Amino acid sequence: MAEGVLDAGVVAIAGDHGGVALKDVLKAALEADGRTVLDLGTEGTASVDYPVFAARMAEALAKGEAACGVLICGTGIGISIAANRFAHVRAALVHDAFGARLCRQHNDANVIAFGGRTIGEEVAKDCLRVFLSTPFEGGRHERRVAMMGPR
């Protein structure tokens, strides 16, 4: 396994009511791949607040309970903004495999975010596979990533 690849370790997953259906699909896909998944909720379609789930993700990463994370809300916008409030989280909202690859290669993202209402299940699964298997390139990107602060 290449250095910096997120392929090993626990994957935390969380989402609000707008992301719960996709969360369940991605959790099942991760488990089918033999990965350990830490499910941080939510469990149903009742309205909940996405910043709560972003904070749960941040806490799990800070405590070392997970190596990386997946966040999902209706569009992915709100939950990714909420997650990026935390210094040790670098969340990237992704819509395709190209973005999933580059957020790892160039930005060393440790959390991938999706819109449960804006991305198809198969595309999201493909993005997640790419995200988990792509290493951070370092090199010229290290300086830029360092400008964003420690993770």
Image (tube, rainbow, N blue to C red):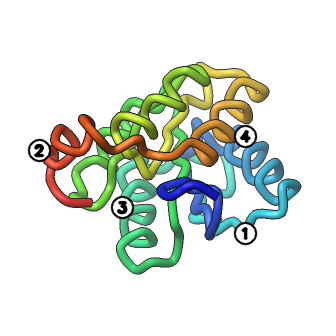
Residue 78's spot in the image, x, y percent? Answer: 36, 35
Q: Nearer the viewer, mark 2 or mark 1?
A: 2
- Residue appearing at x 54%, y 33% in the figure: 114
Q: CA distance from mark 3 to mark 2?
A: 23 Å
Q: Name the secondary structure under disc 1.
A: loop
Q: Quadrant of the C terminus?
A: bottom left
Q: Is residue 94 above or below residue 64?
A: above
- The residue beneath circle 4 is 21
- The residue beneath circle 1 is 36
Q: CA distance from mark 3 to mark 1?
A: 20 Å
- The residue beneath circle 3 is 55
Q: Amino acid at mark 4?
A: Ala
Q: Tell me the crowding category of disc 4: few under 14, some 14 to 19, or many 20 or more residues within 10 angstroms, Cα based.
A: some
Q: Amino acid at mark 3?
A: Ala
Q: Amino acid at mark 1?
A: Thr
- The residue beneath circle 2 is 147
